[in-house]
Structure formats: structure tokens, C-alpha cells
Image (spheres, rainbow, N blue to C red):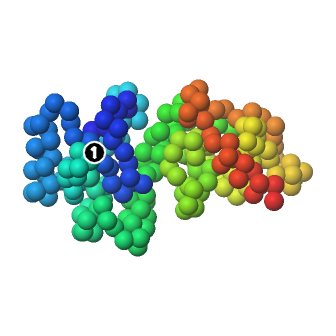
Amino acid sequence: MTSYKNPYLDELDTGVFVRYNYRANDEADNRKLALALENGDPLVYFQGIRPGVFVAYYPVYAVKNDLDAGQFVIAMDESMRFFGDPLHMTIDERRYAERTVRARLHQPLFRARVMNAYSTTCAVCTLKHADLLDAAHIIPDFDMGGFATTTNGMALCKIHHAAFDRNLLGITPDYEVRIDQNLLDEIDGPMLRHGLQDMHGRNLHIPTRVIDRPSRDALALRFAEFNA
């Protein structure tokens, strides 16, 4: 378990492995993890996203006891157990591992964090129905810079997510919504008018915590695409 306020500085190594620090003053817990490593036992990993709320991953496996660093290395996907030394993976092995783990694990955690940051509210229109909201990437997740972090995400309703992905809706680095000029000129009924055209010029609904707000640099890159 890695809590929301993590005193051990556990770290997610690009999503492929968790480097899980030895528990201080709890040799029994450390011995159990060492035994799980020896036996190849499956584990459940709970990652905190806010106080009392966790995303659970199962199965995960201890694959290395790094004595020098005082850490266990936890593989976030079962296939990672068969890659040899996790501390010395080849470039191709790491690329494969990152693709595999990103598809399986990043999205649930990314969605949970983004929805929490935005209070389950669309950043454009403030719709609050969770079933109609997506955790949208600013820089797409298939790009090198498309990290599954809160600052690279926004909570968007389905229509605004689709419009953003297709550069029909843009967001300035100053958090202002822009609609494509062709859509502004189009006449097509109330959904277009109220769902998109009326959003032009609105200020983005952003998280209360500064550290959760959209990256202005990432928005600048996407807004340049929108303008193009």
C-alpha cells in the first residue's frame, strides 16, 4: 500500500514497476515481502488517490529485493516477471513493458485522480454526471510526453472530449475555451449552439489545488495545433 500522503517516497518507475521502500521498524512486513518474492506469490497493490480512497491492482509481484537501495521492486503486470533483471532491462523490453502496463493500469488511476481533482465536473461546461465524463489527456497518451498525470489531464464530458481530441475545441494556456471558427459559423440546432458555440470564450473550470491544474506548457502545444 502506498498512501495518499506517502512517508516512504515509493515511486512508480514509468508505470512498469513500483519501487517500494522497506517498512521502517517493521521487519515482519519486510520479511513477508521477501518471502512473496521467493515463492512468486501474487500481491495486491493499493495506491492512494485521496485520504481513504485507493485504486487496487491485482495481481502484482515482487521481482527484486534491492538491498543497496532498501527497496522491493514490484512488477505491475504478471508478464514483467519473466523479463530477467528488472533493474537492467533492454530498451525493447522496457518499451514493451511500458505499452503493456500503460494499457492495463494507467487509465484507472489517471481517471480516478483527474475526477478527484475536478470534483467530477466537466472543465468546460461543469456537467457533473460521472457516467458522462472522461479523463482526457492534453498531450495524447501515445505521445512521448503523454504522461498519465493530473497536470496532463482534464475532466471533460463526452462531447467536449471528442471536440478537444479533434481540435474543434481548444483551450488557451490562460485557461480560456475557444471553438473552431467553422463551428461558430455553422447553423445546426440547439446542441451545436448550447453545447459548443456558447462555450466559446468561457473560462475553464480548474482544480482548486494549484498542483492539479492543467500544465500551461501542454495546453500551449495543443492550442498551437488547434490554431493550425
Q: In the orientation shown, which residue stands out farthest toward the right?
A: 185
Residue name at image x 26 percent, y 47 percent: 69
> In what element is the residue under mark 1?
strand
Residue name at image x 45 percent, y 51 percent: 107
Residue 203 in percent (x, y) is at 75, 33
The reply to whether residue 79 is visible in this rendering is no
Task: Specify whether 25 is left or right of 217.
Answer: left
Task: Specify whether 5 is left or right of 78.
Answer: right
* Picture quarter with the N terminus: top left
Judging depth in this view, the residue of 136 and 97 nearest the camera is 97
Judging depth in this view, the residue of 210 and 187 nearest the camera is 210
Relative height, residue 28 to residue 209 (above, below): below
* Picture quarter with the C terminus: bottom right
Residue 151 in percent (x, y) is at 57, 42
Judging depth in this view, the residue of 67 and 192 nearest the camera is 67
Residue 220 in percent (x, y) is at 72, 48
Amino acid type of disc 1? Tyr
According to the image, label 1 marks what residue? 20
The reply to whether residue 51 is visible in this rendering is yes
Task: Tell me the crowding category of disc 1: few under 14, some 14 to 19, or many 20 or more residues within 10 angstroms, Cα based.
Answer: many
Task: Specify whether 171 is left or right of 15.
Answer: right
Judging depth in this view, the residue of 222 and 63 nearest the camera is 63
Residue 15 in percent (x, y) is at 39, 54
- Give the quarter of the image for residue 142: bottom right
Q: Count the marks: how many?
A: 1
Residue name at image x 42 percent, y 45 percent: 109
Residue name at image x 35 percent, y 38 percent: 9
